[in-house]
Every structure is written in C-alpha cells, then in structure tokens.
Amino acid sequence: MRKTTIARRPMDFEGREQQMLVSWLEIQHRAAYAVTWHTPNGGARDKATAGKLKAQGVKAGVPDLQLAQARGGFFGLFIEFKATPPYDAAVSGVQKDMLGRLKAEGYRAVVCRGIEDAMREINAYLGMEPTARQVPAQ
C-alpha cells in the first residue's frame, strides 16, 4: 500500500497579518482608513495579464500600503509590509529603490515587520501635527 501525501498550500503569513492590520486601522483610525489603500503588485499572473497591468502603470517595488494623510512635514505614509519574523521576507532591491524615491519626494516610506511594528508606525505617524499646506484658490 502506498502512502499518499497531500500538498499543502503555503501559509500567507504576510497577507493574513496585513489584513488584520487594515481591520485594526478601520476600527482605531477611521479617517486614516478612509484614505488608505493597498496596491496589489505581487502574485502569480500570466504573461498577458502582467503585460496589461504594466501598460496600465503597475510598477515593481511600490509599497503595500499607502496612507494619504499629510503629517509631520510629510505628504503621506507608505508602508512596505513584511510578516512578523521569522516569516518575513527580504526587502528586494527594487523595493528599497522605490522607498528611497518616495522619501526624496517628501513621503514617510518605511518597512514594517509585522502587525505590531506597523501599528506603532501608524500611531506615531498619525500622532504628528498635520503638515501645513496651502490650498490653491479655485
């Protein structure tokens, strides 16, 4: 008699933690939640779909979460989210480059390893004074 093994899908620790983070944000910081989104750049795609998305503006290295509230002299917060160690992945070169470009443009752009790290970052960011801005006349 042969022993059969069932292949298990790998656990998406990063996705599950990020989902919990977004749920926390919705409860704790509703105004920030309203202007926060995830850009789904990763995942398996066929070549045709990948080509269409690239032509539509998808770029490698874009951080996972964008929070569009200006605080502490920054124009917004970008978070490259990684799972809590030891389930975290390395930050790729293209991700590091994008974070550097965003920082150079006046955004707070960080890597957070796990939900607790991200919650601390978001709380600290939202605790800063709103960035002074001049609204153009209409």
Image: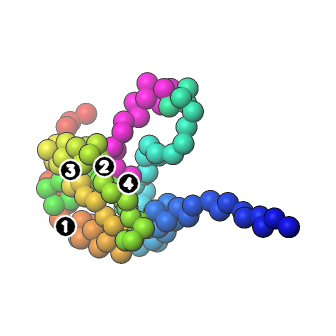
Span colored in magenta: 51-67
Q: Nearer the viewer, mark 1 or mark 3?
A: 3
**Real-space Cα distance between discs 1 and 3?**
14 Å
x and y percentages locating residue 48 in the rendered image:
55, 26
SS at mark 4 in the image: strand
Residue 102 in sight: no
Q: Are marks 3 and 2 in contact (CB under 8 Å)?
A: no
Residue 98 in sight: yes
For marks 4 and 1 on the same chain, the one whose residue lies earlier in the sequence: 4
Amino acid found under the numbered disc labelled 4: Leu
SS at mark 1 in the image: loop
Determine whether, in the image, residue 74 is placed left or right of residue 2.
left
Examine the structure image and report whether residue 60 is included in the region drawn in magenta. yes
Q: Which mark is residue 128?
A: 1
Tag 4 residue: 65
**Real-space Cα distance between discs 2 and 4?**
16 Å
Query: Callout 1: few (<14), some (14-19), or many (20+) C-alpha neighbours within 10 Å?
Result: few
Name the colour scheme: rainbow
Tag 2 residue: 92
x and y percentages locating residue 115 in the rendered image:
39, 71
Determine whether, in the image, residue 109 is placed left or right of residue 22.
left
Note whether 69 is above or below 87 in the view shown. above
